[in-house]
Amino acid sequence: MNEFVANNRVLYVDDEEPLLAAFSSLLRREHVEVTTLHAPQEIETVLQREGPFAMVFSDLRMPGMDGVAVLEHVAKTHPHTMRVLVTGFADHESTIRAINDGGIQRYISKPWEDRTLRELVREGVRAHNLESHNTHLLEELKTRNEAMKELLQGTLAGSTRILSDLVGHVNPEAAAQVDRIRRAGKTVLAMLPNVGSLERWEALRAFDLFNLGIAALPAWILVGLTKHGLSSIERFPHATTHNLLASDMLKEIPRFEGVARIIRLQQKDYDGSGPPAEDVVAGVEIPLGARILHVLIDLDRQSTRHFRGRAVLEQMARHPEKYDVSIIRTLLEGKSASQPSAMSTVHSLDELQTGALLLNDIVTEDGQILLRKGMILSDGALVMIRQWARHDTVVLPIQVQLEQQTPTVPS
């Protein structure tokens, strides 16, 4: 934190040198640094060289440049400096006009009373520094808040990445599904401009982490899912509620409470039915991210090589009791923006790219299935395949479909 330095500098402008000397002499025992100026035309030079000042006093009547002009110049260059007009009793009307028109904050009559002038200087310097200190603290708080925000965003992004990578290490097929859902989810959000920033952020994190609970399943279930594929998850009743495991893991992390709620309700039907039964919520009261996940996960599960994309979405649109049909319509309307993807035959694992869609299983020579067709390759999946290939031969070539230019749901 930058240390606040008090400003105890006071300037007095007057064309009468005896008054300048008297002013300096009067304040010599006060905790202030006094500067005097005999030529008011030099005010700009003095402000640049020795300013800013906590207070500037200026005589009203001076040749060439009067006190009002001097203090107006101070106000333009140093608006937080307290400005005091020094005036004779005969100048009462001019003083009032100067205060009203020139933004002068105080005035003192001359000849001044020594005690009054000293008290005015003490009060003015103290008030100036109090205001300046408060401004300094607010700026420091703003700077720290920005730094904390950057740190927090970086920490949250790192936490999300670590948790998402955990799924890839446990079950690459689940990680590939996350990648597909994330891409489609971003497409949906991009077509919904009225979504608030927090709601959008929470939905995006939910797209990253909705399969996190799979990493917390018992080992015997994970072995079964690896052997039979993610589509076999219905065989394992405990595995079908893996989203509740993920929700329980995330809700304890600061700022992930909303993300946890989205994942908890991702299987909730639009009419309020569906798990978890204890959460009584329906329609638009279900978080947007959960409604999007419900549509995209079911779309992903129901899609086959011959029945996918628009056909599945149109069938789902016939069930408004189950899905938020407006999300399905958004996806259907966005289909026209998709571009055909190129198919490619890969003859080396080094040619595989993140985002490519597998058109056949990746298997070893002894028949071990590493990745199943229909998966979109993630970074974690590529690392796993290449590490495995060091110890066992992977069957080549591999058929893939390159990533679409405009990410949408499978067509």
Image (cartoon, rainbow, N blue to C red):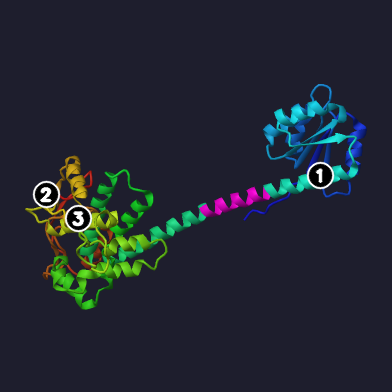
Residue found at x 18% / y 42%: 333
In percent of width and height, residue 254 lies at 42, 64
Q: Residue tagged by mark 1?
A: 121
**Between 63 and 167, which is closer to the camera in this rendering?**
63
- Per the rendering, the mark at residue 164 is none
Image side of residue 147 versus residue 153, left or right: right
Looking at the rendering, which quadrant does residue 238 occupy? bottom left
Q: Is mark 1 on a helix, strand or loop?
A: helix
On the question of residue 403 being in view, the answer is no
In percent of width and height, residue 237 lies at 17, 74
| Mark 1 vs mark 3, CA separation in Å | 71 Å
Q: What element carries label 2?
A: helix
- The first of marks 1 and 3 along the sequence is 1
Q: Residue tagged by mark 2?
A: 314
- The first of marks 2 and 3 along the sequence is 3
Q: What amino acid is at disc 2?
A: Glu
Q: Residue tagged by mark 3?
A: 295
On the question of residue 37 being in view, the answer is yes
- Give the prevailing secondary structure in the magenta stretch: helix
- The part of the chain drawn in magenta is 132-145
Residue found at x 52% / y 54%: 145
